[in-house]
């Protein structure tokens, strides 16, 4: 894993967590990683009955702005788990 340059100021993990919690209220969210690469676990009843791709899409849509552009703070989501409590 190389260095990923970004102009983002602040905690990227907090920004990811905040963005997901706005899109999926009452979710339990764990974000780890750094250097542009992150692992995310989201546990929410909103995932009940949804196909895996639908659950992933909800999460990715919520952080799309953090992945946009050449100097985006999120370069890759190495692991994404979407679980029902």
Image (tube, rainbow, N blue to C red):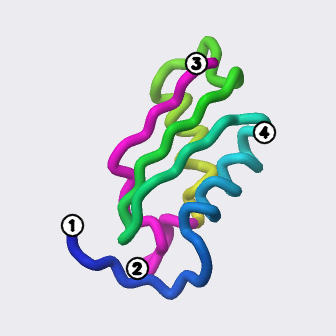
Which picture quadrant has residue 33?
A: bottom left
Q: Earlier in the sequence, mark 2 or mark 4?
A: 4
Front: mark 2 or 1: 1
Callout 3–callout 1 Cβ contact below 8 Å: no
Magenta range: 66-85
Q: Is residue 52 left or right of residue 1?
A: right
Secondary structure beneath label 1? loop
- State the image coordinates of residue 18 (x, y, percent, origin top left): 70, 56
Please name the residue that numbered disc 2 is placed on.
Answer: 70
- State the image coordinates of residue 11 (x, y, percent, origin top left): 58, 72
As displayed, is residue 28 above or below residue 71?
above
Callout 1–callout 4 Cβ contact below 8 Å: no
Mark 2 and mark 1: span between their CA atoms? Answer: 17 Å
Q: Earlier in the sequence, mark 1 or mark 4?
A: 1
Front: mark 4 or 3: 4
Residue 25's disc number? 4
Secondary structure beneath label 4? loop
Q: Earlier in the sequence, mark 3 or mark 1?
A: 1
Mark 4 and mark 3: span between their CA atoms? Answer: 17 Å
Mark 1 and mark 4: span between their CA atoms? Answer: 32 Å
As displayed, is residue 42 above or below residue 34?
above
Secondary structure beneath label 2? loop
Please name the residue that numbered disc 3 is placed on.
Answer: 50
């Amino acid at each position: 894993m190389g260095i990923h340059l970004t102009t983002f100021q602040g905690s990227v993990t907090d920004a990811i967590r905040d963005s997901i919690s706005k899109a999926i209220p009452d979710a339990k969210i764990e974000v780890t990683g750094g250097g542009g690469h992150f692992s995310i676990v989201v546990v929410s009843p909103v995932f009940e009955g949804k196909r895996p791709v639908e659950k992933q899409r909800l999460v990715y849509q919520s952080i799309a702005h953090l992945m946009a552009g050449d100097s985006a703070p999120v370069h890759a989501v190495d692991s994404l788990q979407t679980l029902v409590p």
